[in-house]
């Protein structure tokens, strides 16, 4: 009970600092939103000018609109489309001529105009447009063949050709990433940003609890507690539970806030909860180590910032681990952040469960055990030495 009382005092002291309300409540969710808006997987916009090109032109536009991860934005004229592409409102544009259907049904070749800025997105969009045109061309060639063999015009044969084409079974293509760190196609826009920022802020917020422990030691409060029937182990556990509670509160705010505000799906609840709990133990252990080994709250604050941001950057919370060279990625796994990010990647990208993340959880628990053992030794020395 004494340990829980000490932990509750630490949590109340942390909540009384108004600056913490911004850094714990607002800043993490703000960064999650910014990362999702800038780097999240969203529909790519394709501008289309298609006024009176006839049914085949309308069919082409509808086919493009039905393409996964592609949104068609209509424009009235070509100049408006060019301005939209230049200003980045759409990634690329397609201009369908007014005589599109008439030319194709007469057996001619209709030319569409492609407007794009250099970039990967425009190349992918062009591939999608070429695929849609190829599908329509297949049906059109079939209609022309039937009209030539059995008589009639191409227009009257198009509906029958389209019906037959729809009934022909297609080829199912299953795409599997060669590297397991590649994100799955159904990953939400904000999911990865929320997971990496949870790892960053849980650790950083925990470390910023270290100066409070130094202040408690400096004021002699720990020694006074030991002069009561409170044992050294109870004081150590109480201070540790206080920092663990701060880490868990930070994690809960990010998990609940991102789920409610941005629709983030955290995957398997037992697996996600286990990752959060294990990494919170790591953060609390590091906070206890800084608070026990250092004698100045200024030193602790500066080192907390350097460690919090430095380990997060190396561990994949600022730049995804998959973009690192192989050697750097191996070095990154010296940090607990890399193991936590690997665990979240398995849960969020590949639908993994608790069993699938046992290895990184074991590493995180080992980190927590080693660091907490060092913290306990320094704490006893600082309080009783």
Image: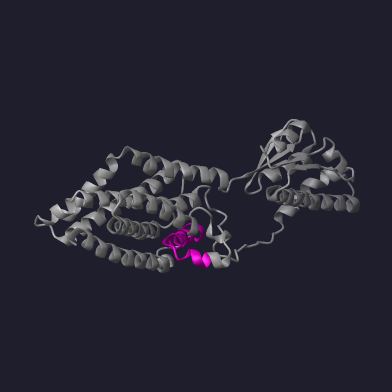
Residue drawn 80% across the image and 50% down it: 137
Examine the rendering and report whether any part of residue 43 can be seen. Answer: yes
Is 117 left or right of 112, judged from the image as shown?
left
Which one is in front, 375 or 326? 375
Q: Position of residue 347 (x, y in %)?
A: 46, 59
Q: How many marks?
A: 0
Is 249 left or right of 161, judged from the image as shown?
left
Is 294 left or right of 46, judged from the image as shown?
left
Q: Is residue 159 above or below residue 78?
A: below
Q: Position of residue 307 (x, y in %)?
A: 41, 55
Q: Is residue 354 above or below residue 158?
A: below
The span shown in magenta is 329-351
Residue drawn 82% across the image and 47% down it: 157
Is residue 232 part of the magenta span, yes or no? no
Which one is in front, 35 or 127? 35
Which one is in front, 273 or 17? 17
Is residue 346 part of the magenta span, yes or no? yes
Q: Quadrant of residue 53?
A: top right
Q: Quadrant of the C terminus?
A: bottom left
Examine the rendering and report whether any part of residue 265 can be seen. Answer: no
- Secondary structure mostly taken by the magenta-highlighted segment of the chain: helix
Q: Is residue 378 above or below residue 57?
A: below
Q: Is residue 357 above or below residue 228?
A: below
Q: Quadrant of the N terminus?
A: bottom left
Q: Position of residue 344 (x, y in %)?
A: 45, 58
């Amino acid at each position: 009970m004494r340990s829980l009382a000490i932990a509750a005092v630490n949590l109340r002291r942390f909540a009384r600092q108004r600056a913490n309300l911004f850094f714990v409540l607002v800043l993490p969710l703000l960064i999650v939103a910014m990362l999702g808006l800038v780097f999240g997987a969203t529909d790519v916009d394709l501008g289309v000018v298609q006024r009176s090109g006839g049914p085949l032109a309308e069919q082409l536009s509808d086919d493009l609109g039905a393409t996964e991860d592609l949104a068609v934005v209509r424009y009235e004229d070509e100049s408006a489309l060019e301005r939209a592409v230049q200003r980045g409102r759409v990634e690329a544009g397609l201009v369908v001529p007014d005589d599109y259907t008439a030319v194709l049904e007469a057996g001619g070749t209709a030319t569409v105009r492609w407007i794009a800025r250099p970039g990967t997105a425009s190349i992918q969009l062009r591939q999608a447009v070429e695929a849609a045109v190829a599908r329509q061309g297949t049906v059109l060639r079939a209609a022309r063949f039937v009209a030539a063999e059995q008589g009639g015009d191409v227009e009257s044969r198009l509906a029958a050709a389209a019906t037959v084409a729809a009934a022909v079974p297609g080829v199912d293509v299953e795409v599997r990433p060669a590297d397991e760190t590649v994100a799955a196609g159904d990953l939400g826009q904000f999911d990865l940003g929320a997971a990496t920022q949870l790892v960053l802020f849980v650790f950083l917020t925990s470390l910023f609890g270290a100066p409070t422990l130094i202040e408690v030691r400096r004021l002699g409060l720990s020694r006074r507690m030991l002069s009561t029937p409170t044992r050294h182990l109870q004081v150590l556990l109480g201070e540790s539970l206080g920092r663990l509670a701060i880490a868990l509160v930070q994690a809960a705010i990010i998990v609940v806030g991102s789920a409610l505000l941005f629709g983030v799906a955290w995957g398997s609840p037992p697996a996600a909860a286990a990752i959060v709990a294990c990494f919170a133990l790591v953060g609390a252990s590091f906070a206890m180590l800084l608070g026990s080994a250092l004698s100045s709250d200024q030193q602790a604050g500066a080192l907390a910032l350097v460690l919090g941001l430095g380990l997060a950057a190396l561990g994949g919370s600022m730049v995804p681990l998959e973009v690192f060279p192989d050697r750097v990625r191996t070095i990154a796994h010296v940090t607990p952040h890399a193991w936590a990010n690997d665990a979240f990647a398995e849960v969020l990208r590949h639908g993994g469960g608790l069993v699938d993340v046992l290895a990184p959880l074991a590493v995180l628990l080992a980190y927590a055990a080693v660091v907490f053992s060092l913290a306990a030794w320094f704490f006893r020395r600082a309080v009783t030495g």
